[in-house]
Amino acid sequence: MNRSVTPAEMSVILETLLASPPSSAGKRLRSERDLAALVGLDRMKVQKAFDLLVDKGILLRRHGSGTYVRKVPRTEAAPAAPASVNVGAYTLSSEQLFAAVSEKPLRWQIHRQRKLNLGVLPNLQWESASNRSVFEGIKSRIRQEGHLMTRLKLAPQTDAASYEKAVRKLRGSACDGYVLWSSYAGMLDRAFPGAKPPVVFIGARERAADLRCSPIVRVSIEDAIVRALGILAEEGYRKIGILGFQSIERDCEADRIVYRETMEKLGLAYRACEFCPLDDKAVMEAVRRMFGAKNRPEAVYVADDVLLHHVVRAWSQIGIVPGKNLGVVTLSSHGNPLPKGYSWSALEFNPFQVGRMAVDSLLQEIETVGEMICSFEHLAAWRPGSTHSL
């Protein structure tokens, strides 16, 4: 038995072989037991070597099927990676890593060949028209593809007992794949501590790397802030503020940082940044703080279309008219009505399309067995009106 090779060394050997052409993405590896026997190693060493590559996102385990190459390693030696490597007294070739094609056919073969049951967990932590629109987009795309949908009705987790009940319900759902809001990533990890089922997340601020390499359809709030401030700066405004929505569930520190950094890049020293809950009294206090000062803004980005209704009421009480004595750009979601009487300049997201994109990503994830890490950033479309330019 070849005991001189450590798990870390074995993981480097595997990574080197996987980097050699042709691409091994999507291929299924030999079982840990078979590979260990092939090179005279203890099975636990091979398992730990696999674990290291799973943690790096190179390999992907599928329960009941095997271990797959999720992505080809990117190493400096990749263009000239050897086709075989010595493992102690044994020589291992890249071809020997993989299982025969005839072994263990995937139970989730190409999704067009059979109906799938896709689990969807809507965002129950914050009910809104935008989240409902995302869910409608998910339903529409699943129905269009001819698959089945299981809506996971998990009650809000207000305590440890209800959280564990929701985890057990998720674990017992037995779906072919899942579309989950990113806030449920921890619950997925708890429900499936080993091999994860195919899953695509929907989120606003999380990066794919934060979700253990699972694909994510990400609504880029930061990009909307940067573009809104840039549009107002192009109009000649130098005193640009931002008004946004904040609650216990929604921390806006990332938005504040993006605002400060963008104003700095634009060469503007002015700062007026207020975030408040969806409450007329709280909004009025924020508006008075921003516009009661001598150094009041010339233009404002209202970073939430629901908040905008409260803000317009507050402005009307202190005599401010959007597009007349204040330049305004707002964030909006397609289908959400904005306050009447104005031609709003808006950066518009389409949550319905976000839902459809998530289903497309999940079907691709299932079909390719994680070969493609198909994360997307959904960017807002610019809808110019008459409120951003005086």
Image (cartoon, rainbow, N blue to C red):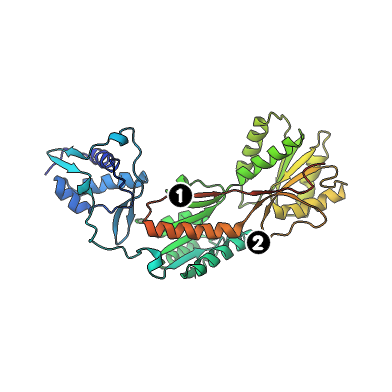
**N-term-proximal mark, 2 vs 1:** 2
Q: Which mark is residue 265?
A: none
- As drawn, is 302 to the left or to the right of 378? right
Residue at the extreme right of the image, as rendered = 319
Residue 82 quadrant: top left
Residue 297 quadrant: top right
Task: Quarter of the image for the C terminus: give it.
Answer: top right
Give whichever of 384, 175 is nearer the camera: 384
For the residues labelled 2 and 1, the Cα–Cα distance comes to 26 Å
Residue at the extreme front of the image, as rendered = 22
Q: Which mark is residue 211?
A: 1
Residue at 32% over, 65% down: 107
Task: Quarter of the image for the N terminus: give it.
Answer: top left
Give whichever of 266, 307 is nearer the camera: 266
Q: Residue 109 location in percent, x, y?
A: 34, 64
- As drawn, is 122 to the left or to the right of 30? right
Does 306 appear above or below 301? below
SS assignment at label 1: helix
Q: Residue 74 location in percent, x, y?
A: 35, 38
Residue at 48% over, 63% down: 161
Q: Which mark is residue 129?
A: 2
Give whichever of 27, 5 is nearer the camera: 27
Q: Is residue 190 visible?
A: no
Residue at 80% over, 38% down: 298
Q: Is residue 373 visible?
A: yes
Give whichever of 343, 117 is nearer the camera: 343
Would you say the residues marked 2 and 1 are in contact, meaning their CB atoms lie under 8 Å apart?
no
Q: Give amino acid for label 1.
A: Leu
- As drawn, is 111 to the left or to the right of 349? left
Q: Residue 294 location in percent, x, y?
A: 84, 34
Q: Give amino acid for label 2.
A: Ala
Does 278 appear above or below 58? below
